[in-house]
Image (cartoon, coloured by chain):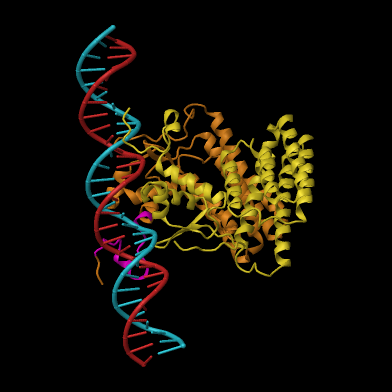
Chain colours: A yellow, B orange, C cyan, D red
Amino acid sequence: MASTVVANTVITNTVMPTLSKSQLAYRSVKSRISDGTFSPGYRLVLGRIAAELGVSVVPVREAIRMLEAEGLVTFERNVGAQVAMLDPDEYRTTMQTLSLVEGYATASSAPFMTAGDIARARTINGRMADTLKHFDPVAFTRLNLDFHSVLFEHCQNEHILDLVRRGWDRLRALRESTFSFVPGRAQGSVDEHDGLLRLIERGAEPLEIELAARGHRLATLDAFLAHEAARPSRGDHHLTTSIQEKP
Amino acid sequence: MASTVVANTVITNTVMPTLSKSQLAYRSVKSRISDGTFSPGYRLVLGRIAAELGVSVVPVREAIRMLEAEGLVTFERNVGAQVAMLDPDEYRTTMQTLSLVEGYATASSAPFMTAGDIARARTINGRMADTLKHFDPVAFTRLNLDFHSVLFEHCQNEHILDLVRRGWDRLRALRESTFSFVPGRAQGSVDEHDGLLRLIERGAEPLEIELAARGHRLATLDAFLAHEAARPSRGDHHLTTSIQEKP
DNA sequence: ATGATAGGAATCGTATATCATTTCATACAT
DNA sequence: ATGTATGAAATGATATACGATTCCTATCAT
């Protein structure tokens, strides 16, 4: 077989149709936003990213455009792209939206949850309780997503499921450790998780589950807002203190 | 001033920064999907669209990518783009999602509605009642959007507002006249609109408004599903009978 | 010293060109 | 006649090239 193309990897070549350069760029940038390599405000220079990935700017532009549509990246004409900023208002609306769609997803997923799913969720929640003793916000936040994933992943509505995942993606874009972890909130969160599980277990009405899940997320938001208001020290206009570096 | 660029229009040139070719392509394709020129299943051939607009394929690709992220267009690697199909399941999930986000938007918009807004909504609903006498589904559907727009546009959460608009965009993508208009449903719809307005007027609890608005949309969905099930004649796998023409 | 202005570097925007892939039609063998 | 192979045409994918815009900086006048 001729191999004039500079393939991404030889391993994937054999089984998969070698994901396109656009997809390569998309995944690369998205994951680097997720893991914090590119923090909010980071300037995404097309040429530089293209060079790093060994491709031209065209597929990178496409990738950026897709990320823009997902809200992970902002774009200004003739100026360029940067990782979406998360000012307090953005955080608030994102959490509100997530509370809405995740609440619904959780409720409509509940009837499809098996006993195994519930047990798994309980195990994760137990581990969350454990992390509280060691004060490990990063682990806690990751487990939190795991827990809720078990609860909403059976939702039959793909659109809503997609919105839930996008919401989590946006939140993950900020450095989990430094931010969005309100000390006093964690224990209450674990307790509410338990309450949610009990509701699901006894086959509660969908609306009851939905409102409980929604309330759970909004409580986290409220805790954050209260926490933020209590220390107006630095958090005046940006939640993140990411530095804008120069190329 | 030198004008080497082939500007879009001379009028906009003086005040606006002459929207980019990508935006031009985006709007053009989107509006043609909305007005039904490009019906579901229509193949969006990049080269042809580019030629029609007098631009190259690169900005067209970007536009398609953005539309894809919004769900108006589907895309397959090395095959191309087409206007998103709307099979019954897609319609169901879209309506469900819209019921969720629109319900919330309506409830959170309610406190900001003025007496003028309510009067305006009532006028529109009156006109909807009128259309019923002439049987004009197209006008009815348009008025329906107008009515709900008045109800949800004051929502303070831009994300959710955006989701609502996208939901309506998707629904509009199908030819309104032939589809999604269930004869027996219209009168009930007008009545429920009136009920919604009364709820808002008396300053009902947000949750009550939300559930009423949600129920209103789901009732339309149920009416459609029942209507569809009643005549399994042709609606087996596609709601639209758009023909795939050849270039 | 301060402000304005001109020039240049960086970066974006888009056209053109070329390669790769898919698809369809035709021809051939069974 | 049916199925399969082959090749050509259409289209998508991406690199390269160049023009346009923005932003920064150095210079100059006040």
Percent position of residue B63, x then y: 39, 50
Q: In the rendered structure, does residue B13 fall within the stretch colored magenta?
A: yes
> Which is nearer the eye, A127 or A153?
A127
Q: In the rendered structure, does residue B21 fall within the stretch colored magenta?
A: yes
Residue A49 visible to an observer of this rendering: yes
Q: How many marks?
A: 0
Percent position of residue A140, x then y: 70, 47
Q: For the point 45% across and 37% down, which residue is it?
A: B85
Percent position of residue B44, x then y: 36, 42
Q: For the point 59% across and 38% down, which residue is it?
A: A157
Residue B187 visible to an observer of this rendering: no
Does residue D9 lie above or below A208 as drawn? above
Does residue A141 lie above or below B116 as drawn? above
Q: Is residue A100 left or right of residue A21?
A: right
Residue B173, located in which quarter of the rendered image? top left
Percent position of residue B75, x then y: 42, 39
Quarter of the figure with the C terminus of chain B:
top left
Does residue B224 lie above or below A91 as drawn? above
Q: Is residue A136 left or right of residue B11?
A: right
Residue A91, located in which quarter of the rendered image? bottom right
> Which is nearer the eye, B32 or B147?
B32
Quarter of the figure with the N terminus of chain B:
bottom left
The magenta stretch spans which residues? B4-22
